[in-house]
Image: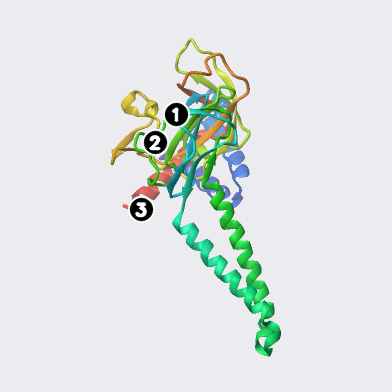
Amino acid sequence: MIFHSLDFLIFFLPVLAVYWLLRARKPQNLFLLVVSYYFYGYIHPWFLYLIFASTVVDFSCGLAIAQGEPFIRLYAPEAARLEKIRTVIPGSVHAGEPLFELVSPDLKRQKKLARVRQANSEWEMAVAGLHTEWARRARIAREEKNRSASTLAGLEANEQRLILTAPATGLITDVPPDLAEGTWLGTGAHLATLVDLTHLTVEAYLEEDALGRVHAGARGRFIPAVAEYSPVAVHLERLDVSPVPQLDEPLLYAQSGGPITVRMQNNVAVPEGALFRIRLAADEIPLWAHWRLRGTLHLDAEPRSLLERWWRSLLMVLVREWEM
């Protein structure tokens, strides 16, 4: 069965129809796995060994380039102004100690409006007994007061997120040289790095297609690029749902021998494609934990058959050609 034969067309059309009818991801994957075995076994039985090896590899490791490091990177949670640096940098800090205080003018404006609405509602409730029409509005004013209070509580919680504290005891380093009070920061802007020798974290950057195949708690293995250092078992703790706007790790630049192609834009390294940051924690601390290393991350992922890879590649080509 070859791709331009009638046999393949008769095989492909029912597969396509069943694939879209299943809708759910897991049944789709299982169906494509089964028909992949049939397809390659139809060509030649020996190809079943090839697809079996591919299935096992896809299930046991999702390949990504990561940096093993005993450092915790601190980022601006949203666009804001750096109001105050509340610690000596560089210097030692304790867990929970405030580090940076950010201010969002838009957040302050929303809080002010919420307080005004809350005050107006309280005034209407207070004078409800003085006039019949005001008494009718008392219930509406009470509901408005509750909404304003709920909105205000949410805004205050967001404001607390802008006070960044040390997630662990350690040493603050790697602060951008131009970082100063009054500086405007974008979402995800790098602020500093906390050296925590009691933990080992691995940050990896995955493409969108790979991100959909891994889940929190997935097991993996980080293999340092330096052969003298031993691999370490890790587990996935966090997946970012938004692509990184910039890559602030020079070790991963293709220009530095890393795997990620970037372009410099206003002195900022912007990835050529959409990349998503994931963070993993080591199960135990290796002897090389005090070093910052580049390496390879092998991560458990949902299996994907060769036929599904081919099918998704075909869809991407069709979408790209359609947009052109």
Q: Secondary structure at mark 1?
A: loop
Coordinates of residue 205 in the picture (x, y in percent): 46, 34
Report whether residue 262 is seen.
yes
Q: Residue at x 48, y 62 (%)?
A: 109
Coordinates of residue 284 in the picture (x, y in percent): 62, 20
Mark 1 or mark 3: name the one nearer the start of the chain.
1
- Give the number of the disc on residue 322: 3
CB contact under 8 Å: marks 3 and 2: no
Q: Residue at x 62, y 42 (%)?
A: 26
CB contact under 8 Å: marks 1 and 3: no
Q: Residue furthest bottom?
A: 132
- Marks 1, 3: nearer the viewer: 1
Query: What count of labels does the image hold?
Result: 3
The answer to whether 259 is drawn above or below residue 133 in the figure is above
Specify the amino acid type for callout 1: Pro
- Marks 2, 1: nearer the viewer: 1
Q: Nearer the viewer, residue 174 or 300?
A: 174
Q: Secondary structure at mark 3?
A: helix
Specify the amino acid type for callout 2: Leu
The answer to whether 266 is drawn above or below residue 136 in the figure is above
Q: Nearer the viewer, residue 59 or 243?
A: 243
**In screen coordinates, is 184 left or right of 308?**
left
The residue indicated by pointer 2 is 247
Report whether residue 62 is seen.
no
Q: Nearer the viewer, residue 180 or 221?
A: 180
